[in-house]
Amino acid sequence: AGIDQSRQATRSSLQKINGLWELQGSLIRLALYFSPAVMQASLELIPEQTRRVFLAYSGGLDSSVLLHLLLGSKSTFAIIPWHINHGLIAEADAMEAFCVQQANDYGLELRLDRLELGKLQSNLEAEAREHRYRLFSEAMTPGDCLLTAHHGDDQAETFLLNALRGSGSAGLRGIAVKRNLGEGILVRPLLDYSRAQLQTYADEQQLSWFDDPSNQSDRYERNFLRNKIIPDLERRWPQLRQSLVVASELQAQAQELLDELAQIDLAEATAPDNQGIATLHLPVLLKLTPSRCKNLIRYWIARQKLTALPRRRLQELLKQLSAREDALPQVATPEYSIRIYDQRLFLVIERNELELPCRVDFATQTKIEVDDLGLYWQRDAIFELLHCEDNGQQLSLKFRSEPQLESDDKHRLKRLFQKHRVPPWQRNTTAQVYLDEKLEGILP
């Protein structure tokens, strides 16, 4: 009995010692994790050649932590907090005043922009973000870096939001750590930290920040997830946020592989440029599996910096790849359309219809210009193109908008369009060259 009691006491002592070691290890890890030096190491993502660092500064907890980290760094770049007042909440002016005061206290020059978005009826979050990043992009010059204070919780929420919207790997990969923006670069150095960790850092450093009351409004999708849905999920799955962050990282890796595959396919499928319009060889697309073909088309659209084609529209496009050419198949969005002609896919940006004159007479002028079309030619270059001798003919340009054409001209014009492979949607704005009222050719 005495031996058993001794063994039990020894085990109890060892358990306590192990518990103390684990506690000490946890405390050491916690202290290291939240030390300013370790958190400032995240700023190493900023390129070495950076001259100016703009910080998207709302005055909230996250951007206040990032501003404090920047001020504690030993780098030589200029630090410019940038506040954008969207005017969407009653406290917008108070937030602006707080940011101005904080910048003054730190001895920094604040960049301030105001947007009027209150009358927008669509998704205010998306509209505000679009306007904000447009401002950022236009201001970036070589050597500039923009920092935003997105953190791990934002990453988890973004994954859930995009999953609920039915996004693929491109959406589920979440928020990028770094990407190009205008002529500069965008960096998000806090994605490895949770909001709770930023809160701990801010408390330890005794920082001040402005609590945006709109964060409590469930009017916005992200707030609804953050305030209503995620807390319930975390009570059942405590590691939810970490798991979603890992899932985002895996999706990012998957999307990287898909992009690499699309680059290979694009190199084989790219057709000759058609007046600045991106084109793909239809026969190459038809050889690919449907999944691989969709992947290539998504990548092709993304390279033009256009909004992704909705899933149903993409499926519809695949069905049209085998349609008869004379059917002139196309899939349209408000931003662009994808059309099929001459065994090629065309990505056509939608623009307002031009009101062109039926004809423009240039007589014997040496400069032939139509500003609306960006058409600028020298007379001698036109004669060289048409293989005609210049004998002082009266030169005119006509367009398909002319109500009536002579029967012979109609047939000749059709043959010219076919010979030069002019797509049907470009024919109304293709200049027809007439010399002494005789159709001689077209200008590409």
Image (cartoon, helix red, strand yellow):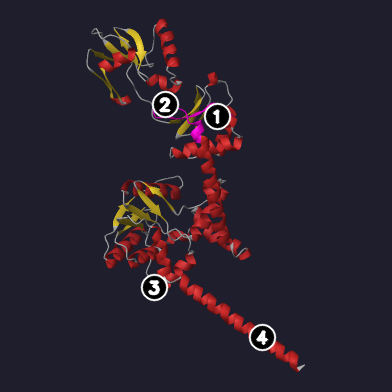
Kindly report the distance in space between the C-alpha atoms of the residues bearing marks 2 and 4.
Answer: 80 Å
Which sits in the foreground, 225 or 343? 343
Whether the residues at callouts 3 and 4 have beta carbons within 8 Å, the answer is no
Residue of label 4: 12
Q: What segment carries the magenta color?
A: 266-286
Q: Residues within 10 Å of mark 4 (few under 14, many from 20)?
A: few
Vertical relation: 8 (above or below) 33 = below
Looking at the image, is mark 2 or mark 1 earlier in the sequence?
2
Q: At label 1, which amino acid type do we have?
A: Val
Question: Is the C terminus in the top left, top right, bottom left or bottom right quadrant?
Answer: top left
Q: At label 4, which amino acid type do we have?
A: Ser
Vertical relation: 323 (above or below) 183 = above
Disc number for residue 205: 3
Q: At label 2, which amino acid type do we have?
A: Asn
Name the residue at the right extreme: 1
Looking at the image, is mark 1 or mark 3 earlier in the sequence?
3
